[in-house]
Image (cartoon, rainbow, N blue to C red):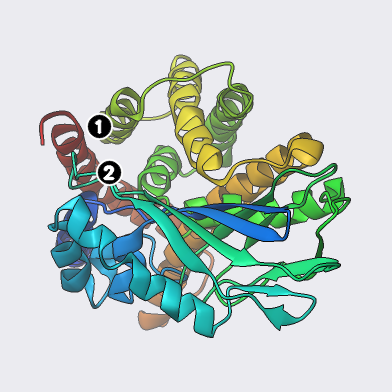
Amino acid sequence: MRGLSRLLALRLVFLTAVSSMWLMMLAPMAAAHEVVPSITDVTVEGGTLSMALRTNIEAQLSGIDLDVVADTDEAENAADYDALRALAGAAVAARAEELVQTWNTLPLITVDGAAVALTLEAVEVPEVSDFELPRVSEMLMRGTVPEGATTLTVTWPDGAGDLVVRQQGVEEPFTGLVAGGADTGPIAIAGGDAVTGWAAFADYIPVGFDHILPKGLDHILFVLGLFFLSVRLGPLLWQVSAFTLAHTVTLALGALGLVAISPAIVEPLIAASIVFVAVENIFARGLNRWRPVIVFGFGLLHGLGFASVLGEYGLPDGAFLPALIGFNIGVELGQLTVIALMALALLLGTVAARAARLTGGEQVVEEYAIMFRAWSMTGSVIIALVAIWWVIERVFL
C-alpha cells in the first residue's frame, strides 16, 4: 500500500510538472488572433470580370502559412503580422497592390485556360478597434474577359488559407470552398454549376472537423471537461449527447439567421461554461441529475459559436441543408477524436506503468481508474485556470 501511495505521488508530481508546461503553452493562445477565411464574389458582365474580395490583407502580406496555423500568434513570423496590424488602415491599403501583383503571377483568374490580368480598383481597410480580432478588408479587382469565353477558374495561393468563391449574376451559380494551393476547376460563365448536395456535404465535413482540431481550443477544453468527470462511459455518453443535441439546435438556428447574438456576449459565456465544468469536476464525485441539463444549456452557447464560424464561410443556397449537416458531422468527429486521443493516452500510460513493474495485466482497469482521477484533477485545474483567463480577457481586455 505504501508503494502504491508513493507511485501515485510520483505520478501526481509528474502530471503537475507536465500540466504547468501545458498551461504556459496555452496561456499565449488565449490572446487569439483568429484566422478567418477569405470570401470572394465573382461576376462576369459585358466583357468585364469583377472580383470583390474580403480578406485579411496583413495576414496575406506577412507570409504566414494560413493553411497550417489556426492562430497568427502561433506562426514563426507573427511579429511581421503584428507590425502590419499596428499600421493605420491607409498604410495597409497602400500595400494592397503588392498582393494583386503577386496574384497575377499565379494567376488568380484564368478564362478558358488563359490568364486574366487583374487591376485593383478599390480597397477599404478599417482601423483596428480590437487588436485581438482579425481586421477584414475589402478589395475590388477587375479584368477583361475575351468575347465568347465559356469558363473561368479561380486559383488560390498556397498558404493563403481557405477561400469561399461565390459566383454572382447568373442562374444556378457556383459556390465552393477552395483551400490554399487549390482551384475551383472550370466554372461555366453562363451559370449552371451550382454545387450538388453530396458535394456540399463532403466539402463541409472537414470545415467542421478543422474547427475542433486544431482550431477550436475552447471547444477542446470543454469536451475534455466532460471527459474528466468520470472514468465510466455512462456519464460521458449522457453529457456528450446533451451537448451534441443542444449545439445542433443553435447551430441550425444561427445558420438560418433565426438567432443572432453578438460574439462579445457568446464568447465570454463559452469561457465561463468551461470554468463551470472544470470546477465541478474537482468537487463532484460523479454525474448528478442536473449536470446533463446544465451541459445542454452550455451546448446552446457553443452552437452559437459554431454558427458564427459557419457564417464566415457561408453556405451554398442550393445545398444549404447538406452543407449544414456535413459541418455538424465534422464537429462531432472532431469532438470524438479529442475524447479518443485522451482515453488512448491514459490507457497507454496505464499499460506502461504496469509493464514497468513487470507484473500481470489483471489490474490494468483498476490502474486506469487511479490514473484517470489523477489526470482528471490536474487537467480540470488547468482547464479552469485557462478558461478564467479567457473570461477576464474577453470581458475586460
Q: For the point 56% across and 53% down, which residue is it? A: 40
Q: Residue at x 56, y 46 (%)?
A: 313
Mark number, residue 380: 2
Residue at image mark 1: 279
Relative to 365, does residue 66 appear above or below in the rendering? below
Q: Could you tell me which residue is drawn at 19 percent across and 41 percent down?
A: 130
Mark 2 residue type = Ser
Occupied quadrant, residue 24: bottom left
Q: Of helix, strand and loop, which one carries label 2?
A: helix
**Kind of residue sitting beneath label 1:** Val
In front here: 335 or 265? 265
SS label for mark 1: helix
Point out the tag, 2 or 1, that comes first from the N-terminus.
Answer: 1
Work out whether 297 lies above or below 43: above
Residue 356 visible, this angle:
yes
Q: Where's the C terminus, which quadrant? A: top left
Q: Is residue 347 above or below residue 249?
A: below
Image quadrant in which the N terminus is located = bottom left
**Residue 193 image position (x, y, % from top left):** 85, 54
| Quadrant of the rendered image containing residue 129 | top left
Discs 2, 1 touching: Cβ within 8 Å? yes
At which x and y percent is residue 312?
Answer: 50, 43
